[in-house]
Image: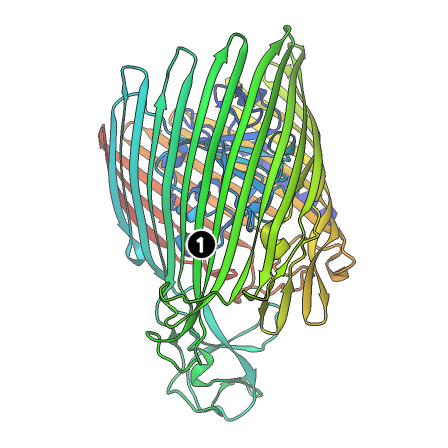
């Protein structure tokens, strides 16, 4: 039945897209648009026009970035086909993630900054909140498995954030203010000397007091109801078992980033560049709020209907939430030169991440300003290097050969601290987990132009992966784990057939993998009586993926349509196996994903364009002996349907955009029983609209107003969504 509904919905949306199509922006920017002149390097590691690149590709350029209200880099991706961004509280979210092609989490999508991998070895995550925004030249998004070129973490796709290189003197400064005492500022300056040396430096900051996103619930019980206030709320299964007694206070956040880039053209064909940034993202919570009347004693209850009452004691809601901070230092050095007919590229870089957060661990009767707590500190250090050469072989082949090497080290320590809102006075570690990993790889790709309209891409990569020095436990009595070595061979074949001048077919088949993270291998922890047990013997997850698509333009390129279908067959999924009060990670699952992505654009007038895209994702667990209730269910964290549409305009001194976004039900439980809507900890379907208007009274001056969630929709994406917000900004550029 669900399959029939899916087919019907796909057909309906396809008809809408073909009829009222997504438009190209007048100045040639892109938002799931197929600009024939755009160049992409991430798809093949060599320069290609978007229409010639294998696979489903989107390039987001500076004009596209300016048209949105972007707080963090991942905000720029949340209305693309085939991409779902989980960011539930805006800047305050400490665990945002990217989901592509039915894979749940950053660990399945390789994220690069100027070619430098950003995914850490601890969880495979990306510290999106610490990345700079204003220094971006463009973002290249490659959907689909890419392990044949990039190795692990590229099962769902690749996102490459490419920073600006000044070509002339430039200066920009801006600032703004909005709802929730939100502020933002940025400054940058750059220039190019003697047509050989470029320099750019920038600094940006943003902060907000936030809003109360997290309600506090008490369990419904029985007894005399003599305390007014609060209100009933079902749990995520639809059962009337909870009473909202307060909230955890306003959830605020702040980010600051210093970034820079040096570039030297040391010859007519050679370039040496160094890019770096140092970023910090912090979040905190204000004092909690009570919705109840006078505090009662231990036998006080609140009425919830004729036979239901919520037990309410003073410490039912005084459960303070801690603070968190992530510091990210990233540096990348790249060398590029042509020796004869060989294009040579070398790259080396490092990512250093310090992540820490606190929890309140007092009795619950302590004050907000003096309660004890615990601190968790995770430090990640990654080093990456790659050498690659591209050479023509005859007139029909371009061969790329390369090798890469990466090392990762991750250490997590727990501490008891006297005050839960401070990182000081940590003392001795009470629990440790950590380990090291290294990956060595060889890869090759042959671009074979069989005939003018048909090109084949044949790729093959070998990865050898090792984890070692793994340990977990109380210092002095830790369990040390033996090293483990795995290897993977990742082939891929892609074809691009330009059947007609405005018709292009693309198809591919390949293999990809994801090695288990150091968190999955070595981190054991306990919460509410349940032990979450790591497993040092985990194997990599693997996938065979198949894809086919068509891109078509009409009316001299004013109308463009694209449709891509794909299938993923996934094995060795890492799942928890439940054994009493212990959950053990194990390779116990298989999954299958069918998907369809439809994109369309139409340019109504030179200054007005429309666009839309639709994504259908049937990501289903097909086999899970350790969790049979999940079989046949939708993969958690993945909406089955998403739809985005918008209007873009740019006319003389005016620029504007209006974007509407919809996503269907998202499950957080593997058995898909969490079907309730409008309650805390559930993910319900939602539709919301955002707009941005920019006025350019002078060539060097911009004034903009952003209105997010125009319709003031209220919904839960685990946490309560924010309401309608405003943000005004002034920018001066030279």
Q: Residue at x 60, y 57 (%)?
A: 471
How many numbered discs?
1
Residue placed most toward the observer, 608 or 447: 447
Position of residue 600 measured from the top left corner of the image (x, y, whole percent): 55, 31
Residue placed most toward the observer, 486 or 51: 486
Using the image, determine if residue 672 lies above or below residue 602. Answer: below
Q: Quadrant of residue 520?
A: bottom right
Q: Quadrant of the C terminus?
A: top left
Colour mode of the rendering: rainbow
Residue 666 visible within the image: no
Using the image, determine if residue 476 lies above or below residue 712. Answer: below
Q: In which quarter of the image is residue 7?
A: top right
Q: Decide: few, some or many residues near mark 1? Use Cα within 10 Å; few <14, some 14-19, many ≥20.
A: many
Residue placed most toward the observer, 578 or 424: 424
Residue lying at the far front in this picture: please name it. Answer: 476
Q: Which residue is drawn at 59% across and 68% down?
A: 526
Position of residue 345 measured from the top left corner of the image (x, y, whole percent): 50, 21
Position of residue 569 measured from the top left corner of the image (x, y, whole percent): 74, 42
Horizontally, residue 403 falls left or right of residue 183, namely right
Q: What element carries label 1?
A: strand
Q: Which residue is drawn at 54% across and 20% down?
A: 48
Residue 221 visible within the image: yes
Q: Residue at x 56, y 18 (%)?
A: 389
Using the image, determine if residue 567 lies above or below residue 391. Answer: below
Q: Quadrant of residue 528?
A: bottom right
Horizontally, residue 146 falls left or right of residue 75, namely right
Residue lying at the far left in this picture: please name it. Answer: 698
Horizontally, residue 706 falls left or right of residue 41, namely left
Q: Mark 1 points at which residue?
A: 355
Position of residue 22 measured from the top left corner of the image (x, y, whole percent): 51, 32
């Amino acid at each position: 039945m669900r399959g029939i509904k899916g087919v019907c919905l796909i057909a309906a949306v396809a008809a809408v897209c073909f009829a009222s199509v997504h438009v190209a922006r007048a100045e040639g920017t892109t938002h799931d648009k197929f600009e024939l002149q755009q160049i992409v390097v991430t798809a093949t590691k060599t320069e290609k026009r978007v229409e010639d690149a294998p696979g489903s590709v989107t390039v987001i350029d500076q004009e596209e970035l300016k048209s949105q209200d972007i707080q963090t880099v991942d905000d720029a991706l949340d209305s693309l086909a085939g991409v779902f961004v989980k960011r539930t509280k805006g800047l305050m979210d400490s665990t945002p993630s990217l989901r592509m092609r039915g894979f749940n989490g950053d660990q399945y999508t390789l994220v690069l900054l100027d070619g430098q991998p950003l995914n850490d070895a601890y969880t495979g995550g990306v510290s999106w909140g610490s990345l700079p925004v204003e220094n971006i030249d463009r973002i290249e998004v490659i959907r689909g498995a890419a392990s044949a070129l990039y190795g692990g973490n590229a099962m769902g796709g690749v996102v490459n954030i490419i920073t600006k290189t000044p070509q002339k003197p430039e200066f920009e400064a801006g600032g703004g203010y909005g709802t929730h005492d939100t502020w933002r500022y940025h400054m940058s300056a750059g220039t190019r000397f003697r047509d050989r040396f470029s320099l750019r430096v920038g600094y940006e900051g943003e902060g907000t007091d936030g809003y109360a996103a997290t309600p506090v619930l008490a369990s419904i019980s029985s007894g005399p109801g003599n305390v007014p206030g609060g209100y009933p709320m079902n749990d995520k299964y639809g059962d009337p078992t909870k009473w909202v007694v307060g909230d955890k206070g306003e959830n605020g956040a702040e980010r600051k980033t210093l970034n820079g880039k040096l570039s030297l053209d040391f010859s007519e064909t050679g370039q040496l560049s160094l890019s770096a940034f140092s970023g910090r993202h912090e979040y905190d919570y204000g004092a909690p709020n009570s919705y109840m009347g006078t505090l009662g004693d231990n036998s006080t209850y609140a009425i919830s209907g004729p036979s239901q009452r919520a037990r309410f004691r003073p410490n039912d809601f005084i459960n303070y939430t801690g603070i968190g901070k992530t510091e990210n230092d990233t540096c990348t050095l790249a060398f590029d030169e042509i020796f004869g007919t060989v294009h040579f590229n070398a790259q080396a870089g490092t990512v250093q991440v310090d992540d820490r957060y606190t929890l309140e661990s007092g009795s619950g009767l302590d004050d907000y300003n003096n309660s004890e707590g615990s601190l968790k500190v995770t430090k990640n250090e990654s080093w990456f290097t790659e050498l690659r050469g591209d050479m023509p072989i005859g007139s029909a082949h371009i061969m790329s050969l390369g090798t890469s090497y990466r090392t990762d080290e991750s250490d997590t320590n727990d501490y008891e601290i006297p005050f839960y809102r401070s990182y000081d006075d940590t003392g001795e570690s009470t629990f440790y987990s950590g380990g090291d990993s290294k990956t060595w790889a060889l890869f090759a790709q042959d671009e074979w132009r069989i005939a003018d309209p048909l090109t084949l891409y044949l790729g093959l990569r070998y990865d050898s992966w090792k984890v070692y020095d793994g340990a977990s436990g109380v210092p002095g009595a830790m369990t040390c784990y033996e090293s483990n070595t795995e290897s993977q061979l990742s082939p891929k074949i892609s074809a691009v057939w330009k059947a007609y001048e405005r018709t292009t077919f693309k198809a591919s088949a390949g293999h990809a993998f994801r090695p288990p993270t150091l968190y999955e291998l070595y981190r054991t922890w306990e919460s509410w009586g349940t032990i979450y047990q790591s497993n040092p013997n985990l194997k990599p997850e693997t996938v065979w993926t198949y894809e086919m698509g068509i891109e078509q333009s009409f009316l001299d390129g004013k109308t463009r349509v694209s449709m891509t279908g794909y299938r993923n067959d996934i094995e060795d999924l890492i799942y928890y196996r439940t054994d009493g009060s212990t959950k053990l990670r194990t390779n116990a699952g298989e999954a299958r994903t069918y998907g369809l992505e439809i994109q369309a654009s139409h340019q109504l007038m030179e200054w007005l364009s429309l666009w839309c895209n639709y994504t259908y994702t049937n990501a289903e667990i097909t086999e899970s002996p350790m969790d049979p209730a999940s079989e046949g269910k939708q993969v958690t964290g993945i909406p089955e349907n998403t739809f985005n549409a918008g209007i873009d305009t740019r006319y003389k001194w005016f620029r504007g955009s209006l974007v509407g976004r919809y996503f269907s039900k998202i499950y957080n439980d593997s058995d898909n029983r969490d079907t309730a809507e409008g309650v805390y900890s559930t993910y319900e379907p939602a539709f919301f609209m955002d707009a941005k208007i920019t006025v350019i009274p002078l060539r060097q001056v911009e004034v903009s107003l952003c209105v997010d969630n125009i319709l003031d929709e209220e919904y839960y994406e685990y946490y309560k969504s924010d309401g309608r917000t405003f943000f005004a900004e002034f920018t001066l550029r030279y």
